[in-house]
Amino acid sequence: MDYQDICNFLYREARYLDDRQWDDWLECYDEEVEYWMPSWRDDDQPTESPKTEVSLIYYPNKNGLVDRVFRIQTERSSASTPEPRTSHNLSNIEVLSQNGDEAEVRYNFLTMNHRYRQTDSYFGTIYVTLSKASGEIKITKKKIVLKNDYIRQVIDVYHI
């Protein structure tokens, strides 16, 4: 994976969320992906363990993401009805390390979300582990550090 491949993959994943291409978005993830958004402690530090501390979102594998998308698509999620309009913007994409077909990447995000005539923004830093197998890049680990965690609504996968 070169830097441009990584950027193109991350931009495409964000576009799938904006375009509500849920099945394509799910294809970006490995079956064993850990998808985690820690919460914040009182001392301004994010929690360190999704298994022993409170998280804003935690799925230990892709099944959690599949279930979430199912609820969104079948309107079984009142938090997602009507679906918001989003714009995901990525910046400062940095490859922290690379070993063979695996890369550790850090980047910033800003998501604009419009629903019920109100626009909200969500921003933070994302850490992903990307693996390339059979010519395809997949996310095998994703940690989202949401910097504005005082929010007025339920946070969901399309906000970040």
Image: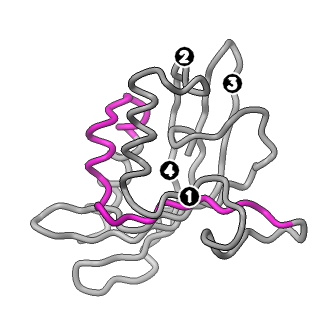
**In the rendered image, which residue does mark 3 sit on?**
119
Task: Answer with mark 3 or mark 1, whichever residue precedes in sequence.
Answer: 1
Name which residue type carries label 4.
Leu
Residue beneath disc 1:
58
Find residue 144 and report its image quarter. Answer: bottom right
The stretch in magenta equals: 15-41
Residue 137: % across, % down: 24, 62
Q: Is residue 43 left or right of residue 65?
A: right
Nearest to viewer (mark 2 / mark 1): 1
> Is label 1 in a helix, a strand or a loop?
strand
Quadrant of the frame with the N terminus: bottom left
Q: Residue at x 57, y 51 (%)?
A: 109
The numbered mark at residue 82 is 2
Disc 2 marks which amino acid? Answer: Pro
Residue located farthest toward the left when viewing the structure as drawn: 134
Residue at 35 percent of width and 37 percent of height: 16
| Secondary element at tag 2 | loop
Query: What's the residue at 32%, 56% (across, down)?
Result: 29
Vertical arrangement, residue 127 with respect to residue 99, above or below: above
Spatial distance from mark 3 to mark 4, Cα to Cα? 18 Å
The span from disc 3 to disc 1 (Cα, nearest Å) is 25 Å
> Disc 1, disc 4: CB below 8 Å?
no
Left or right, residue 77 beside residue 26: right
| Mark 4–mark 2 distance (CA, rounded to whole Å) | 25 Å
Earlier along the polypeptide chain: callout 3 or callout 4? Answer: 4
24 inside magenta stretch: yes
In the image, what residue type sits under mark 1?
A: Tyr
Residue on which disc 4 sits: 90
